[in-house]
Image (tube, rainbow, N blue to C red):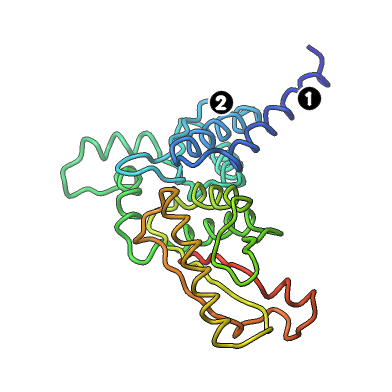
Amino acid sequence: MDNSTKILIGSVVTALFSFGAHFIGSTGSSFVNTLEETAKYEISNAGIEGVKVQFNREPTITRDVTLSGDISEDKRNKALSIVEGISGVGSVRWLDEASKADDDNADSGGAGNAKDANNDSTSSENAEPADRAVVAKCQSDINNITEGKNINFRSGSFYVPPSSYGLLDEIVAAIQPCVGVKLEVQGHTDLMGSPTLNQTLSEGRAESVRDELIKRGLDANRVRAKGYGSTKPIENARTSSANAKNRRTIFIIS
């Protein structure tokens, strides 16, 4: 097989993994499995051998990943950089095998890096508020998913149309692995009409979106709805262009 063929095959595989990581179905397990396979492929494709890739799945599935293996420091750093650059991945850390063995055999008073890594998903889940890095990563993923898209409500209605279901599925799939985070669904209207009616409309639409997210498996305790009416316009105007920008649903991670 010549070099051009190898490059072509590698590009196709990378594209497929990337597609899966962004558009995998609604289960967190499938999403994380795809991320893990992507990380393994990208590390191997960079010519780095002997790296173990393990996404945290106990006691809950997360997008946090632990790398390990007996390789040189420069290769470790390169592997870490590769995985950190994969869209959808949460935190990335290196677990030294020698340190892990020492910790496994140590008395209960010795808490090393390996022990921290093994308990990482637990501590993240119990942390309040969520880790800032996790929040930032999850918000970035949501922003990428919703960029250029919006919930297409009927005029004056709270009804969420089927045309927006795919977007909601993607949002839930992205949030599920984000340990400890919460979501605020914000409803905003344009400047047309009564401020009182706009407030009611924005609250009803935010609640409708929240209900749809819960139907798709998002824990009700992790999501709240809030309407802002016409109080926070992107453009302080009543033109068709401004109205289209001001009518929006925003998803804020915390």
> Within 10 angstroms of label 1, few (less than 14), some, or many (20 or more) residues?
few
Q: Residue at x 50, y 67 (%)?
A: 185
- Which one is earlier in the sequence, the residue at label 2 or at label 1? 1
Q: Which residue is mark 2?
A: 49
Work out how far the residue at label 2 is from the one at label 1, CA to CA, in angstroms. 22 Å
What secondary structure is found at the residue carrying circle 2?
loop
Residue type at mark 1? Leu
Please state the horizontal and vertical placement of residue 94, each as a whole percent of the image: 45, 42
Extreme residue in the top direction: 1
Q: Name the residue that disc number 1 marks.
A: 8
**Dot 1 lies on which element?**
helix
Q: Amino acid at mark 2?
A: Glu
Q: Residue at x 69, y 83 (%)?
A: 192
Q: Residue at x 59, y 50 (%)?
A: 162
The answer to whether 34 is drawn above or below residue 59 in the figure is above
- Relative to 70, does residue 25 appear above or below in the rendering? below
